[in-house]
Image: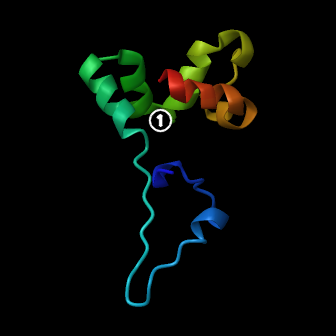
Amino acid sequence: MNFQQMPSDEITRACFVSEPGNRFISCDYQSQESRLIASISRDKALIDLFNNGCGDAHSFVAKIAYPEIVGDCPIEEIKHKFHQQRQDAKKIE
């Protein structure tokens, strides 16, 4: 399993402890690949999302890919209300 695929919740991250004298640093790249693709393709909607919106590309793609399911749900709420569609959108993205 890729470490980026590990859940980012507190309980999971607490399982990892550094050796004495070292520190464990946890980072999230926040869709860097999507940001690069948006820039290279000059996709105005994605660029606007990253510059002015919530930055959640997976929810954004879910809203576009599943309009009949997601409807007018705000992008910020899709992660919690439409989890499966957001997971599927990761594959589409």
Tell me what residue is drawn at x 35 percent, y 35 percent.
33
Q: Quadrant of residue 85?
A: top right
Position of 5 relative to 63 (above/below) = below
- Dot 1 falls on a residue whose secondary structure is loop
Q: Looking at the image, what colour scheme do you see?
A: rainbow
Q: Position of residue 8 (x, y in %)?
A: 58, 55
The residue singled out by tag 1 in the image is 55
Decide which of 10, 45 is in the foreground and name it. Answer: 10
Compared with 6, 36 (above or below) is above
Q: Position of residue 70 (x, y in %)?
A: 70, 19
Name the quadrant containing residue 69.
top right
In this view, the residue farthest toward the top is: 68
Q: Amino acid under label 1?
A: Gly
Q: Find residue 24 and report its horizontal and vertical position in percent.
A: 43, 73
Q: Residue at x 62, y 34 (%)?
A: 76
Which residue is at a point 62% across and 31% down the rendered structure image? 87
Outermost residue, left side: 40
Q: Can you say whether 10 is above or below 39 in the image?
A: below
Single out the residue that lies furthest toward the front. Answer: 1
Q: Nearer the viewer, residue 80 or 75?
A: 80
In which quadrant of the rendered view does residue 82 lie? top right
> Where residue 64 appears, x then y in whole percent?
57, 14
The answer to whether residue 90 is left or right of residue 40 is: right
Q: Residue at x 33, y 24 (%)?
A: 38
